[in-house]
Image: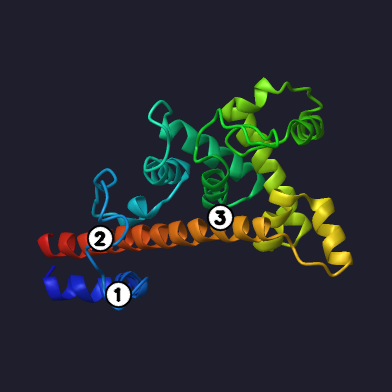
């Protein structure tokens, strides 16, 4: 079969349009053209992407891929005595259970504890997601009718399990409004409800906190979009090359 016939079949399949769209997305995210100083390019790269002639296998972005991507992000900040990939896997796993974006959870942890699982605030909040002991006890009872100790909240697995569940409840309560959910996470739902009912301003500390979380969330979401678009484009371009070699 001649190359021209193969290319015609490839074009008719719609794959070429997908490749063009992917390249357009890559050039439009964060600027008019791809740059070499994008966040991912300017730091240690992720593991090389192995692209085959079947892009569908390469375009899957499952839990393992998400965990590796988040591990790369948090390795910039996480203390050296902690395993970034283990924390990332916990974030992705618990987020999937409650349909919460793991990048949002990661952004919250960054703002709360900078990924230090032994962190303790002046108010007594503990662990990666800075959960108050009273809140932790309530959440543990609600989730699995369990009792937990203060020490348990320093366990990354327990802390993330409770914290993600709490974030999911707040997002549901505020119909997916990230700003209100984050202010409530920082200030407390009852305080937020009282402020809203009395038409009061939210405390500057909570507003600053919400903005800080959303800044990280938006930046990382953009990085993920760039990474996935590049991965998609490379896989499809590779398929074009495979057709030419066939």
Q: Position of residue 20 (x, y in %)?
A: 30, 75
Which secondary structure, mark 3? Answer: helix
Q: Earlier in the sequence, mark 1 or mark 2?
A: 1
Q: CA distance from mark 3 to mark 1?
A: 34 Å
How packed is label 2: few (under 14 Cα within 10 Å), some, or many (20 or more)? Answer: many
Residue marked by disc 1: 20
The number of numbered discs placed on residues in the rendered structure image is: 3
How far apart marks 1 and 2 lie (CA) works out to: 11 Å
Q: Callout 1: 10 Å neighbours few (<14), some, many (20+)?
A: some
What is the x, y in percent for residue 91? 54, 40
Q: Earlier in the sequence, mark 3 or mark 1?
A: 1
Which residue corresponds to mark 2? 234
Q: Nearer the viewer, residue 208 or 56?
A: 208
Judging by the rendered image, the residue that carries numbered circle 3 is 213
What number is the disc on residue 86?
A: none
Task: State which tag comes first along the sequence, 3 or 2.
Answer: 3
Whether 62 is drawn above or below 217: the answer is above
Labelled pair 1, 2 in contact (Cβ < 8 Å): no
The span from disc 3 to disc 2 (Cα, nearest Å) is 32 Å
Is 93 placed left or right of 174 in the picture?
A: left
Q: Which is more foreground, mark 3 or mark 2?
A: 3
Q: Is residue 176 visible?
A: no
**Vertical order, 93 against 212 (above or below):** above
Q: Residue at x 64, y 38 (%)?
A: 130
* Image location of residue 237, percent across then percent down: 22, 64
Crowding at mark 3 (Cα within 10 Å: few <14, some 14-19, many 20+): many
Instruction: Tell me the quarter of the image containing the N terminus.
Output: bottom left
Vertical placement of residue 149 versus 63, above or below: above
């Amino acid at each position: 079969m001649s190359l021209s016939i193969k290319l015609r079949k490839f074009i008719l399949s719609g794959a070429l349009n997908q490749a063009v769209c992917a390249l357009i997305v890559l050039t439009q995210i964060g600027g008019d053209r791809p740059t070499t100083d994008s966040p991912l390019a300017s730091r240690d790269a992720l593991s090389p992407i192995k692209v085959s002639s079947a892009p569908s296998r390469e375009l899957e972005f499952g839990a393992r891929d998400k965990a590796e991507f988040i591990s790369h992000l948090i390795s910039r900040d996480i203390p050296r005595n902690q395993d970034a990939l283990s924390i990332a896997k916990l974030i992705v796993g618990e987020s999937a259970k409650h349909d919460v974006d793991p990048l949002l959870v990661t952004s919250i942890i960054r703002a709360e504890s900078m990924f230090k699982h032994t962190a303790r605030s002046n108010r007594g909040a503990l662990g990666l997601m800075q959960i108050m002991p009273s809140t932790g006890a309530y959440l543990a009872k609600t989730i699995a009718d369990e009792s937990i100790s203060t020490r348990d909240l320093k366990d990354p697995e327990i802390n993330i399990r409770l914290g993600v569940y709490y974030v999911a409840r707040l997002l549901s309560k505020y119909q997916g409004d990230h700003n209100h959910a984050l202010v409530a996470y920082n200030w407390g739902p009852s305080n937020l409800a009282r402020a809203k009912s009395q038409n009061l301003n939210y405390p500057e500390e909570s507003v600053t906190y919400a903005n800080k979380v959303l800044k990280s969330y938006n930046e990382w979401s953009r990085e993920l979009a760039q990474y996935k678009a590049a991965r998609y484009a490379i896989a499809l371009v590779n398929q074009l090359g495979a057709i030419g070699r066939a």
